[in-house]
């Protein structure tokens, strides 16, 4: 039996209520073909997410199904919604699927992307006494639990032969972490772009260390298994993932245009989104044995650190049916 991830009762009730909408009933014709005009695809998004990306790349102009967007503060609550079937698919970093799989969630990694390690950093205030990763010993560090930044922090501590017990970790969502960082209530903040760029812009943050050599920098499109098993939803998911791939490639070639639309969506200064867009450089990649092995290594590391009870088998939470969509 699969168990629901923890969530606030009111928020979870709202998510479950949303599952009554957007079903793909009636979208499959008698001959087995799919009428995508009858499909509603429920998409989970974040501030660094898919909607502004697709809009900037022109990929929302001719969608043959209905897209229903929900925005989340980070990957873990987004995957709670995917598991609860309130969202069909959503974009997250490398660690949320590990935590969701460890909880037995009903999800699968359906598409994957490489990203530059410059897009994830541990930042410190200007003129901080922390000048080297080893200086994190005894420091107070803000991070969103189960996020890609959590994985980055784990990798840094592991390489420096430190444990989470050696650091005063404050598990905070990005908005709360930015406030704590700006007010000097934490010594460092492990986070991803555009929050890294926002901290640099708003709080004169300095990068202590990026993710280079500390953790994989994958991001994923993660789908609910019932959506993958539904012929109509699966057809919409295939089209959606293909659009994401095209948009990601486009954004690497047109960071300024992407940054303008991203700023309009997020209400962040365009100077912040431009820096973030130029740093990310995502590239579509296959969900293959190499990727699964690297994610498994991350899961094993989280289990060894005591951050999850047991490492899940990542291969059991992947679906490679859309690998043919990855651009050559």
Image: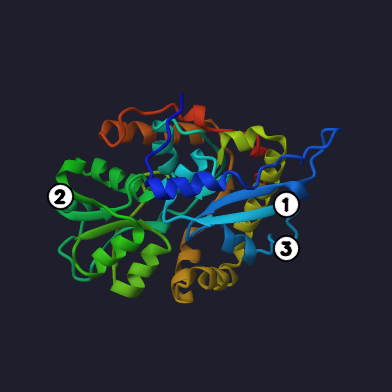
Assess whether mark 2 and mark 1 are in contact (beta carbons under 8 angstroms). Answer: no
Q: Which residue is mark 2?
A: 137
x and y percentages locating residue 265 in the rendered image: 53, 69
Report x, y in % for residue 49: 52, 57
Where does the image place residue 199, in percent across and percent down from the top left? 33, 68
Residue at x 64%, y 48% (from the top left corner): 41
- CA–CA distance between discs 1 and 2? 51 Å
Q: Position of residue 172 (x, y in %)?
A: 29, 54
Residue 220 seen in the current view:
no
Question: Is 258 positioned to the left or the right of 303 in the image?
Answer: right
Q: Residues within 10 Å of mark 1 (few under 14, many from 20)?
A: some
Distance CA(mark 3)–CA(mark 2): 50 Å
Mark sitting on residue 61: 3
Query: In the image, which is nearer the foreground, mark 3 or mark 2?
Result: 3
Q: Residue at 33% across / 74% down in the picture?
A: 202
Q: Which mark lies nearer to you, 3 or 1?
A: 1
Q: Which residue is depicted at the point 69% across and 54% down?
A: 66
Mark 2 lies on a secondary structure that is loop
Eyeballing the image, is 36 above or below 30? below
User: Which residue does the numbered mark 1 point to in the structure image?
Assistant: 65
């Amino acid at each position: 039996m699969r168990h629901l991830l923890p969530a606030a009762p009111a928020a979870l009730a709202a998510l479950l209520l949303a599952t009554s909408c957007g079903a793909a009933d009636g979208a499959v014709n008698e001959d087995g073909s799919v009428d995508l005009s009858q499909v509603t695809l429920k998409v989970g998004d974040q501030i660094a997410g898919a909607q502004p990306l697709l809009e900037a790349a022109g990929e929302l102009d001719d969608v043959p199904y209905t897209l229903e967007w929900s925005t989340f503060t980070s990957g873990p609550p987004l995957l709670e919604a995917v598991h609860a079937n309130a969202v069909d698919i959503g974009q997250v970093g490398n660690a949320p699927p590990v935590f969701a799989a460890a909880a037995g969630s009903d999800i699968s990694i359906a598409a994957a992307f490489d990203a530059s390690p410059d897009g994830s950093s541990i930042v410190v205030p200007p003129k901080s006494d922390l000048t080297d990763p080893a200086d994190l010993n005894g420091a107070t560090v803000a991070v969103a639990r189960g996020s890609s930044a959590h994985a980055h922090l784990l990798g840094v501590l592991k390489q420096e032969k430190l444990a989470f017990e050696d650091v005063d970790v404050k598990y905070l969502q990005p908005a709360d972490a930015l406030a704590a960082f700006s007010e000097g209530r934490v010594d460092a903040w492990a986070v991803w772009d555009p929050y890294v760029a926002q901290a640099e812009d708003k709080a004169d943050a300095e990068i202590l260390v990026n993710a280079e050599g500390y953790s994989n920098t994958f991001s994923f499109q993660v789908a609910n298994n019932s959506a993958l098993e539904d012929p109509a939803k699966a057809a919409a998911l295939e089209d959606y993932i293909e659009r994401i791939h095209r948009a990601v490639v486009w954004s690497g070639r047109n960071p300024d245009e992407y940054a303008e639309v991203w700023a309009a969506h997020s209400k962040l200064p365009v100077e912040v989104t431009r820096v973030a867009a130029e740093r990310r450089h995502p590239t579509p990649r296959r969900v293959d044995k190499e990727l699964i092995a690297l994610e498994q290594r991350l899961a094993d590391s989280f289990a060894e650190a005591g951050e999850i009870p047991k490492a899940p088998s990542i291969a059991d939470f992947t679906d490679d049916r859309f690998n043919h969509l990855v651009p050559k």
